[in-house]
Image (spheres, coloured by chain):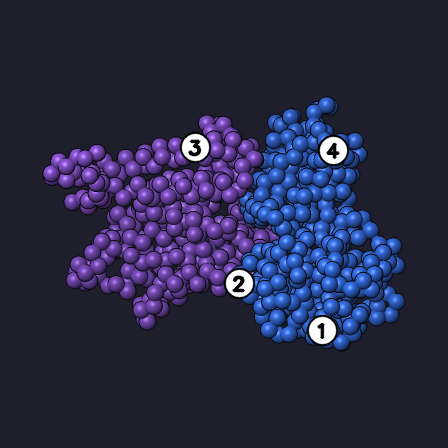
Chain colours: A purple, B blue
Amino acid sequence: MMRIRLEPRAEPSRFAGWLSPMVAAVAVVLIGLVLFSLMGRNPWHALYVFFIEPMNTLYDAGELVLKASPIMLCAVGLSIGYRANVWNIGAEGQLIMGAIAGGGVALAFHDSDSRWVLPAMFVVGAAGGMAWAAIPAFLRTRCNTNEILVSLMLVYVASLILSLLVHGAWRDPEGFNFPQSKMFAETALLPILVAGTRLNVGLFIALAAVAAGWLFMQRSLAGFQMRVAGLAPAAASYAGISSSRTVWIGMLAGGACAGLAGVGEVAGPIGQLLPVVSPGYGFAAIIVAFVGRLHPVGIFFASLLMSLLYLGGEAAQMHLALPSSVTGLFQGTLLLFLLATDVFIRFRLRIVRPPTAATAA
Amino acid sequence: MTRLSRRTSLATLTACALALALPASAQPKAGEPLKIGFVYVSPIGDAGWTFQHDTGRKQMEAALGGRVTTKFIENVPEGTDAERVIRDLAATGHHLIFTTSFGYMNPTIKVAQAFPNTKFEHATGYKTSKNVGIYNARFYEGRYLAGIVAGKMSKTGIAGYVAAFPIPEVVMGINAFARGLRSVNPKAEVKVIWVSAWFDPGKESEAANTLISQNADVLTHHTDSTATMQTAEAKKVYAVAYHSDMSKYGPNAQLTAVTHHWGDYYTRVAQSVLDGKWQQDNVWGGIKDGMIKLAPFNKIVPADVQAMVKKAEAEIAAGKLSPFTGPMKDNTGKERLAAGKTITDAELSRMDYYVQGVVGKLPSSK
């Protein structure tokens, strides 16, 4: 009998690193063809709608980038921690706290004409995200609590705090008691980048974060130490790299980026505080960080892909009348394949034949 | 916002450019069916808010035959994504667009500026513009009737209410229910649990269980799932369903249901667009307009109770009875309506207090 075995490679394969997304793409196209045929749609047209339609016009392209920006920001921040085995799962909560802090500045200076309102929102927003991430960092370094659980649970706390504010103290007095803040003043809104789209200058913040993430991880000593701490914790501590320092850097980087993303949302397309300011960007960023292999450049492309999947799912509903659950299924399949085929980077497939040729088949 | 800033003028320019660039969406061509778009906040499912809107859509399609075609996008989050979806519908030649959730208000208004020839209808909001009409139903009228049934069927005199968020629409439902309840059982009380979610079956059934353990023997809910009904069925207490008839989920528990009906309204609006007679409007329909109905009574509801409710229903429809007619006090004892006075729509839409009979304090009321 023939068996297939997964064997660890001596070192990661560069070839497989390039090959694996290709394999994933082919597999997804095949699955898509079957899935859409079963649903009674022209499968090639369906794939076109999913992957090409959302980039057809200038407005659509703007939407694609607009949606990718917050995911990109969160994922870059998270990847810094993930490289050092610091598992911050709570970017969503840090994003919300950033939106609250930045939005608070916008509301406090609602009547101000100062051009410094917007920068102040981003600074305070980043601080808000960092403060929220500091809680799991502190508990991890002092009490050795699990940062996965603490950061995740704080997501729900953050969303309840936002809810409390928009239902209470920050509720728009003109809003018939509906849970939402005033619309922000012009000075608190991000300027539009391309006329006719919703794309705003928040994109530059995301791109700057990608660049800064790359510089930090690849070119700085602290980044090098983070990577060592992730690859070989024992060696890192032997070399005198402080494990609590890596936890703090990892968590705060994630918190700051998520906080910026939160401000970008409320100062960008939303323009006010609502009970829900993010459709799960902080969680999507976890997948994106891994699809991008925790590398800033990979994350850049992965977040665009994620955004494309969101928009493609909408386009499929609109043009193919596919139910949202089917588009969700297809999106999940694609991400699963992308992550699963990465196994070949570190492992190889080996076909094992038994030594005695007892072929009774 | 009196100052014409660079940003708004830019937006206006863009809007003009878009309007010019999209001649296809300017006017529907004669002879072609009217394309109508619907934006739903949750999956359609088989009961609840969105399900009722979709039922209305189908009814309209059936009524107008080949003269309209419809398209719906389900599960669209409120906020950033909504604007894009609404815009895409407008840009692809949908000349009438229904946006069926409160959180679509600002996005609808924004897109409407860019598509001045497209008609928009937004449910449950309060902002209008030249081409944005709003519509809503007087759900509270049905709540009052539900309160009567609950008051007659409860033995403990305690009703449990699973509610989503303390916005006026939900609060007026609770108050109307309490008024109905007390009209037949002056000592009865309503206990409320807020679950801070429109759709969260886990939390909803947890809340229902808590209410039952606090002696509530009839439940109702202002949330979107069937969890409250299912919990009532399992725990052998009564319940009044909301949005949809849920007798399938609570054959013994469901006394009746306060159900929403949008089909007639959708048909009427689509017809007016077909006739070129659409006008921006603010519609708040109730029992009289057929927007709110009670589902068939469970056979355990005695005939005299059924008759009593039918009578109240007819009186509300005829405008002779309002759930909120004075004397009415809030639950701190403060007078809210003097004897003989009936609440105005403006007062209703800002309701931020509990009436007598509701236990507790409204969260975050200032």
Mark in the foreground, 1 or 2: 1
Q: Quadrant of the C terminus of chain B?
A: bottom right
* Total tally of numbered discs in the picture: 4
Please tell me which of labels 1 and 4 falls first in the chain: 4
Q: Is residue A8 visible?
A: yes
Say which residue appears at 70% left-offset and 64% top-offset: B174
Residue B111: quarter of image = top right
Residue A33: quarter of image = top left
Please tell me which of labels 2 and 3 falls first in the chain: 3
The chain identifier of the residue carrying mark 2 reads A
Q: Which residue is mark 3?
A: A34
Relative to the observer, which residue lies in front, A217 or A184?
Answer: A217
The CA distance from mark 1 to mark 3 is 58 Å
- Within 10 angstroms of label 2, few (less than 14), some, or many (20 or more) residues? some
- A85 sits to left or right of B40: left
Q: Amino acid at mark 4?
A: Leu
Disc number at residue B64?
4
Task: Report helix, strand or loop for mark 4.
Answer: helix
Q: Position of residue B306 (x, y in %)?
A: 80, 61
Q: Amino acid at mark 2?
A: Leu
Task: Report helix, strand or loop for mark 3.
Answer: helix
The CA distance from mark 3 to mark 4 is 36 Å
- Same chain assignment for discs 2 and 3: yes
Relative to the observer, which residue lies in front, B119 or A34?
Answer: A34
In the displayed structure, would residue B264 be above or below residue B68? below
Q: Position of residue B182 (x, y in %)?
A: 77, 70
The chain identifier of the residue carrying mark 3 reads A
Q: Amino acid at mark 3?
A: Val
Q: Which residue is mark 2?
A: A160
Q: Which residue is mark 1?
A: B155
